[in-house]
Image (cartoon, rainbow, N blue to C red):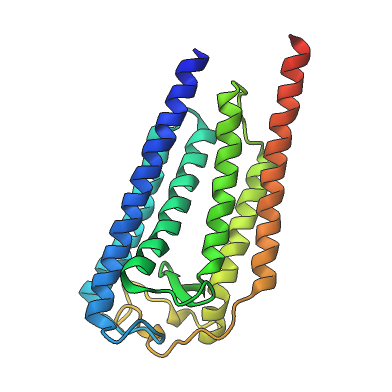
Amino acid sequence: MALLSLHHLRRSLLWLTLFSIAMGFLESAVVIYLRALYYPHGFQFPLVLMPNTMAGVELLREAATIVMLASIGIVAGRNTAQRFSFFIYSFAVWDIFYYVFLKLFLDWPESLFTWDILFLIPVPWVGPVIAPCIVSFTMIVLTLIIIFAAEKENHITISLTQWLLLLTGSLVLIVSFTEDYFHYAHGNLHSIWTPQSKEEIYFAIEHYVPQSFNWILFCAAEVILLLAVYSINRTIQVAKKNSVAKT
């Protein structure tokens, strides 16, 4: 049973990695096409305003990407902890290789501190490229801790406190990526597009140029997430010692 479990986990991780790299390539391919259409002289802020149809497709594409990454994690995992870890692992690998392929084909970004737009749902998320890469590596570390424990036949259950740490860290991260836009919009809710809006989708970002990234908030979020990682790893180690003591 242990060998079967070990084989299953390693095989799942291999296919998840390949799937996520392929997803990263598809994501970069779409961006390459969009930049050829809208940024023939190179990507820069402010963003070019897309027609509503194109913008709507872009919104749905982003949502579909998250659904696909979450779905593959749910299918591959055997319990809640594994499903969650496989999802964030797929997300992390996808995100990292998205930038790898953009660098290969467009020689972009110029540096790890180049500004990028990360998501557009429900408002623009912006930040230097290095920031989402740091988050991705944190996700990979958490996944490997959970998978390593599963290989050792330790049953992993993420506690309520650990879930709260993960959720809180994630929410603070989102704020760090969206704060600059909200500062630009001065908290005006009309700057957030809704189906009832008469303006074009993304109308509010036509003149938006990122000004600053809140590194303090970002680092605080990373600390919270690393506390969650430490706590989960600590739980695993305690369970391991208890298991050894019983034998």
- In this view, 192 is above or below 7: below
Position in image of residue 237 (x %, y %): 73, 30
Q: Quarter of the image holding residue 159?
A: top right
Tell me: 81 left or right of 32: right
Residue 124 in view (yes/no): no
Quadrant where the image shows the C terminus: top right
**Image coords of residue 77 (percent x, y):** 45, 32
Q: What residue is at 57 percent from the left and 27 percent from the top?
A: 150
Percent position of residue 245, x then y: 78, 14
> Residue 8 location, x and y as percent?
43, 25
Q: Residue furthest bottom?
A: 207
Q: Residue furthest top?
A: 247
Q: How many labels does the image show?
A: 0
The image quarter containing residue 120 is bottom left
- Residue at 69% of width from left, 55% of height from top? 224
Q: Is residue 72 above or below residue 48?
A: above
Instruction: Say which residue appears at 71% left-offset and 23% top-offset.
Output: 240
Res 154 visible:
yes
